[in-house]
Image (cartoon, coloured by chain):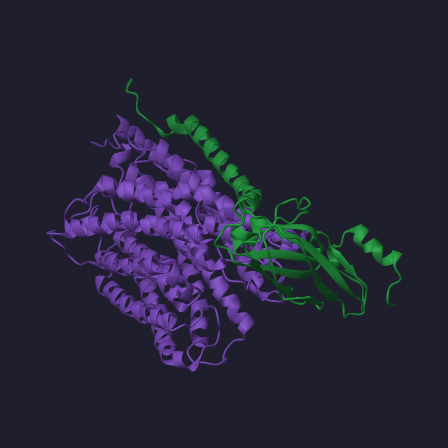
Chain colours: A green, B purple
Amino acid sequence: MATNEPTPNNARPDNARVVKRLLFVVVGMFGFGFALVPLYEVFCDITGFNGRTKNEQAAANTRQVDTSRTINVQFITRVNKGMPWGFAPEINSVRVHPGETKVVNFLASNPTGHNMVAQAIPSVAPGEAGLYLNKTECFCFNQQPLAAGADTKMPMQFYLDPDIPEHIHTLTLSYTMYDMTANAQPDVLATFDATPSAD
Amino acid sequence: MSTVAGEMDHTDHHHHAPSGITRWLFTTNHKDIGSMYLWFSFIMFLVGGSMAMVIRAELFQPGLQLVDPHFFNQMTTVHGLIMVFGAVMPAFTGLANWMVPLMIGAPDMALPRMNNWSFWILPFAFAILLASLFMEGGGPAFGWTFYAPLSTTYSSDSTALFVFSVHIMGISSIMGAINVIVTIMNMRAPGMTYMKMPLFVWTWFITAFLLIAVMPVLAGAVTMVLTDKYFGTSFFDAAGGGDPVLFQHIFWFFGHPEVYIMILPSFGIISAIIPAFSRKRLFGYSSMVYATAAIAGLSFIVWAHHMFTTGMPVAAEIFFMYATMLISVPTGVKVFNWVATMWRGSITFETPMLFALAFVILFTIGGFSGLMLAITPVDFQYHDTYFVVAHFHYVLVSGAIFSIMAAAYYWLPKWTGHMYDETLAKWHFWCSLISVNLLFFPMHFAGLAGMPRRIPDYSLQFADINQIVSIGGFAFGLSQLIFLWVVIKCARGGEKAPAKPWEGAEGLEWTVPSPAPYHTFETPPEVK
């Protein structure tokens, strides 16, 4: 009988090819899951999505001050759950003209009996305003060491880009302080040895 | 000539078939593996159901009486995980194993050894997950969605076991999905073109693609949770430069297609049963196929509707709101087609049809509450309330689970060779139908009135509603024991089933005898 009857065996070589392609998709999608991390970063940086601020030192302010507008910048501070530090802005809000440079101090205290290192993470509301908030100096750029029982005044210098959209009249800048003692950078820890600590 | 060769082949196979426990351990037969998947999913359904009973017993009265809140959280978490990954998904995989080769005229699944492995790693995954409940610090208690930082900073050490078991479940589903795709692409009988495939095969084909696209993303998400917790990475830790909201984006990028993974095969089942008992051909076959594909495609661009309250920009909220509402168009096409199939049909109401009809109505109610949740401004009120619990239980219990029950009754005569006890089965249906509505419908009102989900206690004004809901819950749980009774009774004996026990049924599975022989379609059937 020369009839070309299809049998399951006929399909076998084909199977390997399809399986290979499907495994390629599986591996690709596993990679895509991880690729979402940098993609999300880029997306947030471009759009200001999720209250992201440009958390790096901005170029010195060379912009013209726009005195026709005044924007109310409010400050909020929190400490993460379980974090014992005191942390507060010196003033709760400041009224600035776009392009005008301002310095606001934040007060932090370490009431515990041991040296600690903390990191402040900023967030801006509304999210799109984050793109126009430029910090020329900020304690949030680095981890902050604080010896046992010590307190400190931390400056933050900023200006608003005059291109900030017309409809934004109020901007809220929030800082959350996280305990980073366990993950402190070595050079930050070294400052405790250089200065005499409280104990 | 070929029939003789086929028969010789047949006896040869039987000669080698091992017996006892090794038959089940080493089997590569799609029917054996399908049965194991179905029994496994039913056991998991009872285990996950027992946890729901603990939840409902605690919520029977306000105040804390039976379990402590941490254990309550473990119950809600593991109930969700078991029902999603242990009950619904393996039940569908079991149905695919049994029915896809029979429906396309193939002798078995394309990759039988992998099929064995993809089943047998599942019991280990769930043994690990259940064992974690007995660890010091308890099992996973962060909800089945395992949001960071609940699952990273604030979780117990059982998280490592949770992650490992989810990895195994993922590998199992991916292998199952690859097997289904290869089987459908390469093993169809001559003449079985894509547009002649039964809708159950079509919906599973599309589901399998969803599975291989999103299960790896889930594997990535749990891996990131693991490294954040134990290896010092900061994917979701704001202090280290990560973002906890990112977790929700990654999770729901998996999670939304996942909910369609749990409903698309149901659509296939219902599209087989309604024409059979209406004694009419399915209305709008090709529109059903395209609607299924459209739902699957849209499922990738709606994930953030689970996250309306995370502070997204208005433009994003509006996009996700409209994209979500768009899904009701292809879903509406399906519901319309089912109703149009019944229109002027000669309908009889055997148990599979009763479950299918209940599916159409109750799933549509779940779809409507889903539409309500999709409206961004009102979602701010409904978010994380019992309204959400009511919504997804309508689509998953009276949707997915009811369709699985319908499928079981529809194909039991083919699997066992006996007719099930119709009287008992009708008792099962009516008890389930009444209790499921008593259980989940009042939850809508509790949610609209502001009762939050995943909390072991509640304000006094919710006491009456919760008492009714708990009574419905216990009744629904007990009703499922009737189902167990019917299945065991049917497997052991009963009226002999003909090859085609349902007058209006169509498809290749009804051309083989009942019970389906161990080996079928070794000679491919000719499909005209």
Residue placed most toward the observer, B99 or B518: B99
Residue A163 location, x and y as percent? 54, 46
Residue located farthest toward the top when viewing the structure as drawn = A2
* Left or right of B36 in this view: B170: right
Judge whether B467 appears above or below B185 on screen: below
Q: Is residue B26 left or right of residue A146?
A: left
Tell me residue B354's x, y (percent).
22, 59
Whether residue B105 is visible here, answered yes or no, is yes
Please state which of residues B240 and B172 is positioned toward the viewer in this rendering. B240
Give me the residue at 36% from left, 62% from top: B391
Q: Residue at x 41, y 56 (%)?
A: B87
State the residue at coordinates (19%, 45%): B282
Where is the N terminus of chain B found, in terms of image quarters?
A: top left
Q: Evaluate whether residue B33 shows in this view.
A: no
User: Is B174 above or below relative to A91?
Assistant: above
Nearer to us in this view, B265 or A177: A177
> Is B415 rendered above or below residue B14?
below
